[in-house]
Image (spheres, grey):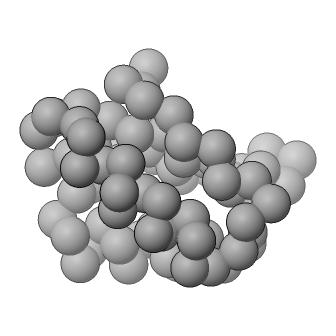
Amino acid sequence: MATATLDTKGMNCPIPIVMVKKRIKDLQSGETLEVLSTDPGSVRDFEAFSRATGNPLLESDENAGIFRFVIQKS
């Protein structure tokens, strides 16, 4: 279970990434952030975000058009 959840459904790039950057600052190292999105482009965006920031992308899945990501703060 994630430490915190961020709902970005209905928002398009770059808003979800901007919101995650702000929210992840509030987490302690090792805590996780679950992000919900409806933007299909968010899949590659969060993969790139994870690589660029060093915050591991632990989970990534899609169900009924809702993309779910779990990112761990490094």
- Tell me where residue 22 sits by quadrant: bottom left
Residue 12 visible in image: yes
Tell me: 36 left or right of 21.
right
- Residue ID at (80%, 60%): 10
Does residue 9 lie above or below 45 as drawn? Answer: above
Q: Tell me what residue is drawn at x 31 percent, y 67 percent.
A: 50
Q: Quadrant of the N terminus?
A: top left
The answer to whether 29 appears left or right of 6 in the picture is left
Residue 63 position within the rendered picture, expressed as x and y whole percent measured from the top left: 79, 45
Q: Number of labelled discs?
A: 0
> Visible in this render: residue 43?
no
Q: Residue at x 54, y 42 (%)?
A: 6
User: Residue 58, position in %: x, y?
Assistant: 36, 46
Image point (75%, 53%), residue name: 9
* Residue at the farthest right position: 64
In the image, residue 48 sits, relative to residue 16, either above or below, namely below
Between 27 and 73, the one lying in front of the other is 27
Q: Is residue 64 left or right of residue 48?
A: right
Find residue 36 and report its horizontal and vertical position in percent: 64, 47
Placement of 41 over or under 7, stated as above or below: below
